[in-house]
Image (spheres, helix red, strand yellow):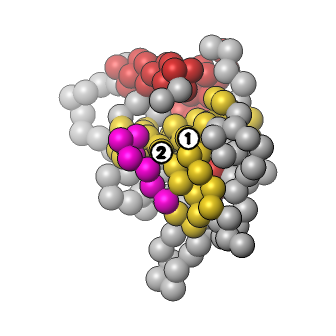
């Protein structure tokens, strides 16, 4: 694993834990409103920027920090992407990870029943070239929205540390 990526990911976790430690733990968790999520995201991005991290934004609205540049070959719709990733919340709580293995998916695939990846994932991963890595910050409107999914609450920004291991072209 890239030491620089690990360092940045740990920095983000520390920032998230600091924010969460200021919260009153005696009250039950209530998912944020859309406005609260926007305010938390603004603080999170400001904190990262103040730490000297260069944050870019895709046209769709996914924030990303390029950790390492690969070979310059970027995935196209229909390509199979082989990645390693860790998904977390802004407070650093990890909800999913494939660092011990890899995960393959077809970029842009949406099945008959709507299965496929979230819009923010597809958009964010498309800026990572083969062999490269990045940190993706996906606002809820590009993730799981106002309903959430599984262990991801409604109106929750999700953060991914992603390494593009391989791109298998469609053609």
Labels 2 and 1: the sequence-earlier one:
2
Would you place residue 137 above or below residue 117 in this image? above
Residue 34 vs residue 92, the one in the foreground: 92
The residue labelled by disc 2 is: 84
- Residue 114 horizontal/vertical position (percent): 50, 77
**Magenta stretch: residue 131 in it?**
no
Q: Residue 121: x and y, percent?
A: 58, 54
Neighbor class of circle 1 (other Cα within 10 Å; few <14, some 14-19, many 20+) is many
Image coords of residue 112 (percent x, y): 51, 85
In the rendered image, is residue 38 in sight? Answer: no
* Residue placed most toward the observer, 57 or 67: 67
Q: Residue at x 51, y 20 (%)?
A: 3
Q: Which residue is mark 1?
A: 163
The magenta segment is 98-104
- Left or right? Give the position of 145 relative to 129: left
Q: Are marks 2 and 1 in contact (CB under 8 Å)?
A: yes
């Amino acid at each position: 694993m890239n030491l620089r990526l690990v360092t940045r990911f740990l920095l983000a976790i520390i920032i998230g834990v600091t924010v969460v430690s200021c919260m009153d733990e005696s009250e039950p968790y209530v998912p944020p409103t859309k406005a609260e999520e926007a305010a938390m995201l603004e603080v999170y991005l400001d904190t990262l920027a103040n730490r000297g991290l260069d944050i870019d934004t895709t046209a769709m609205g996914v924030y990303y920090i390029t950790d390492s540049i690969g070979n310059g070959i970027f995935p196209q719709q229909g390509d199979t992407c082989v990645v390693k990733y860790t998904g977390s919340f802004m407070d650093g709580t990890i909800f999913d990870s494939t660092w011990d293995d890899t995960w393959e998916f077809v970029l842009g695939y949406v099945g008959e029943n709507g299965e496929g990846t979230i819009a923010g994932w597809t958009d964010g991963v498309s800026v990572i070239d083969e062999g490269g890595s990045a940190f993706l910050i996906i606002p809820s409107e590009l993730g799981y929205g106002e309903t959430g999914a599984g262990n991801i609450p409604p109106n929750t920004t999700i953060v991914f540390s992603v390494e593009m291991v391989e791109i298998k072209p469609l053609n």
